[in-house]
Image: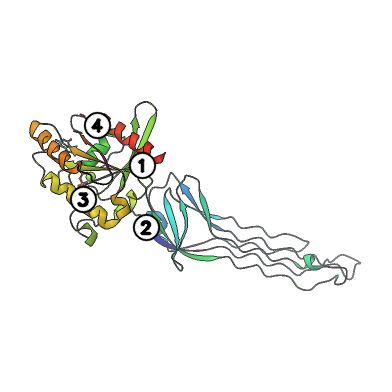
Amino acid sequence: MFRDECEIQVAAGKGGDGLVSFRREKYTPKGGPNGGCGGDGGSVILVASPSVTSLLSLGRKPRYVARSGEPGGPVDRHGANADDLVLEVPIGTQIYDRKRGNLLRDLALSGESLVLAAGGRGGRGNASFATAINQSPRHAEKGRPGEERDVSLQLKLVAEVGLLGLPNAGKSTFLRSITKATPKIADYPFTTLEPQVGIAQVGTFDTLVVADLPGLIEGAAEGAGLGHRFLRHVERCRVLLHLVDVSEGATTEPLEAYRIVTAELAHYSSELARRPRLVVATKVEDESARERAAELEARVAAAVPGVAGFLCISSATGSGVDELLVAANALARAVRA
Ligand SMILES: Nc1nc2c(ncn2[C@@H]2O[C@H](COP(=O)(O)OP(=O)(O)OP(=O)(O)O)[C@@H](O)[C@H]2O)c(=O)[nH]1
Ligand SMILES: [Mg+2]
């Protein structure tokens, strides 16, 4: 199972209390104050880690509590600081404050971290309060409470290229043919239930991170099929590849297939609908497919905003696949620049 959002509560550790204590030495009736300070409570910290790919395990527990600092001891002994509680999240996790609803941080890079809840400071012991006037203070501070926070976490994949299309368009097959990723492939719709990323080698020097997504169908915005919530994963993609099956066996006519996905994209976000795109005719292996591809090209090339090119591929024979990668890479670089 894959999980791309979860809600958790976190509580940092309380600071240890400071101590009230006095020196007791033989033959010294009234020793000075020697109560030590409490240690600091542990903080709760989120770190983006490449070894975590979903929010599944984090979401299993509703609340995470860091340990408290140890109290101060006699003879000026400082209580031990508690260790921080470090929680690993996938790269691309966005953290929202649930009370205020605002975005706290976007952990888009490996190793980036956020202190979600800071540990409470330890209280000072009575030794810290001794002055020339008050040489035997009888009070110490309590440790401060740790911060608490309710957050919701959302994972947005970080990929340069996103694959869009109707179910069975050949998205997963394409990803498999260009990367080491092994998405499931089958001739029934909605084989892909969760987004998956792979890294493609382009030429000798370049790599391209490509995200395979579930198929979109008419009415996805209203929840049809798998809905369109997963489109948030393409929000970060610089470039979209819109795959359209033009083979004999396609269940939907190419132009209609193109229109449906474009409309659902626009429904989701007008900005996303204008994202630079390549339209890709898939399963182009015979003359009739080539004809349908040419027809589609003639229609979509007619000034659709964002469409930067039209290509034909067959992941089965490999024809056009390298050219598509080079074109997608060039477009991604052009957008980045
Ligand atoms: N002949 C031919 N068949 C292909 C090609 N690419 C994909 N297919 C077939 O088309 C069917 C669907 O392929 P998938 O890659 O699973 O399609 P998808 O777009 O990922 O589908 P969903 O995950 O359901 O949205 C499978 O039976 C594939 O074998 C191709 O280039 N040529
Ligand atoms: Mg698929």
Classify 10 Å Cα crowding around label 4: few (below 14), some (14-19), many (20 and above).
many
Q: Which residues are magenta?
A: 303-308
Q: Is residue 313 above or below residue 269?
A: above
Does any atom of ligand 1 lie closer than 8 Å to the CB of label 2? Answer: no
Residue 68 in the image, given as x and y percentages of width and height? 60, 63
User: Where ligand 1 lies, by image quadrant?
Assistant: top left
Q: Residue furthest toward the right?
A: 27
Seen from the viewer's position, the closer of residues 323 and 275 is 275
Question: Is 301 included in the stretch rendered in magenta?
Answer: no
Q: Is residue 27 above or below residue 109?
A: below
Quarter occupied by residue 298? top left
Res 293 visible: yes
Seen from the viewer's position, the closer of residues 191 and 279 is 279
Residue 111 in the image, given as x and y percentages of width and height? 50, 46
Inter-mark Cα distance, 3 to 1: 19 Å
Q: Which mark is residue 160?
A: 1
Q: Which mark is residue 261?
A: 3
Inter-mark Cα distance, 3 to 4: 22 Å
* Kind of residue indicated by mark 1: Glu
Tag 1's secondary structure? loop
Which of marks 4 and 1 precedes in the sequence?
1
Q: Which residue is mark 4?
A: 321
Q: Are marks 4 and 2 in contact (CB under 8 Å)?
A: no
Inter-mark Cα distance, 4 to 2: 34 Å
Q: Are marks 3 and 4 in contact (CB under 8 Å)?
A: no
* Kind of residue indicated by mark 4: Val
Inter-mark Cα distance, 3 to 2: 25 Å
